Amino acid sequence: MATITTAARPPRTAREMAQRLGTVESHPLGFAPRLVRDLPEPAQRWLVRAIAPGTPLMRRAEFRMHGEIKLRGRWHDFTAKQILAPDEGFVWAARTRIAGLPVAGFDGYAEGVGTMRWQLLGVPIIRESGDGVTLSALDRLAAESVLLPTSLIGATWCHGDAPDTAMYFCEVHGRQARTHVTIDVAPDGRLRAIRMQRWGKPAGNVYALQPFAVAFDGEFDAGGVLVPNGIRASWPESGGEFFRAALDAVSLD
């Protein structure tokens, strides 16, 4: 059963959400290039580089990371831990400081429900769920599936709209996500970026589909899997870059 902790324990609801993600078994079949030979060439190029032959097709990842997040026009340092199970959901629990005061909480998606819970000095400041939060979290889950390349071998793929691109659709609890994610792959097979139309309200207005993009400038060697790293997320038409992170540790199972 998955657990989640940070330097300071996150709210109990974050731990409970992580536990509700259940246990996802790795596929016993080890990776071989033939498993992706029917995918669009850019997807093949990325997955063959990212996954070493014989690596189990793992379905769960835990990450420790640090970086900066832009809140109300200012950048703030953060540390975080994330559990990612692309078939089921995610929990991202983080800590930062605003005006010198500690802020802690989590964003998550589990059992078909998206949740946001954040506290300042232990006092709740954000407690959101509902359709808007859930659809945004589901799109985030689809995008972040690239952080576990082994989970995308069985995704539905099609050709992209430009050279070096391909598109995939994810399934969560057997249901296909509403939107597709486009990957952009370097000639050497490194994942350079992804983009999609994501449900969100980055400008603080009403929820709507918005262009969303994530760029990667490196890789983290997790032992048999090269995980995209040097993460920079943005809403290109609604405020620009808002998230920068580097992975400190990765555990796959």
Image: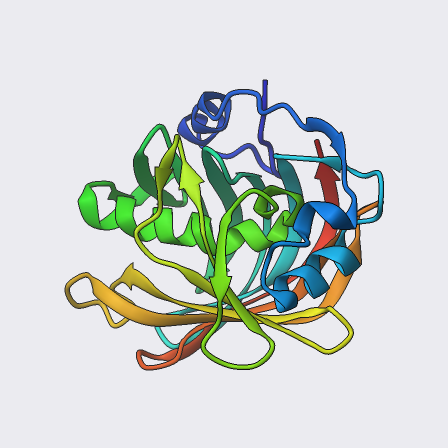
Q: Quadrant of the N terminus?
A: top right
Residue 204 can be seen in this image: yes
Q: Residue at x 32, y 40 (%)?
A: 114
Q: Tell how many labels.
A: 0
Q: Residue at x 75, y 63 (%)?
A: 219
Above/below status of 127 relative to 211: above
- Indicate the quadrant containing the C terminus: top left, top right, bottom left or bottom right: top right
Q: Where is residue 22 in the image (x, y as percent from the top left)?
A: 51, 21
Where residue 144 appears, as percent x and y from the top left, is: 52, 53
> On screen, 116 above or below 37?
above
Indicate whether 231 appears above or below 88: below
The image quarter in which residue 227 lies: bottom right
In the picture, measured across the screen, residue 238 lies left or right of residue 218, that is left
Which colour scheme appears in the figure? rainbow
Left or right: 252, with 131 as reference point: right
Question: Nearest the camera: 238 or 81?
Answer: 238
Q: In which quarter of the image is residue 112?
A: top left
Residue 106 seen by the camera = no
- Nearer to the camera, 131 or 125: 131
At x 57%, y 81%, the residue is 163
x and y, in percent, of residue 169 in the image: 43, 52
**How far from the left and from the top, in percent, is residue 9?**
55, 32
Residue nearest the observer in this picture, 149 or 124: 149
Task: Give the farthest residue toward the left.
Answer: 206
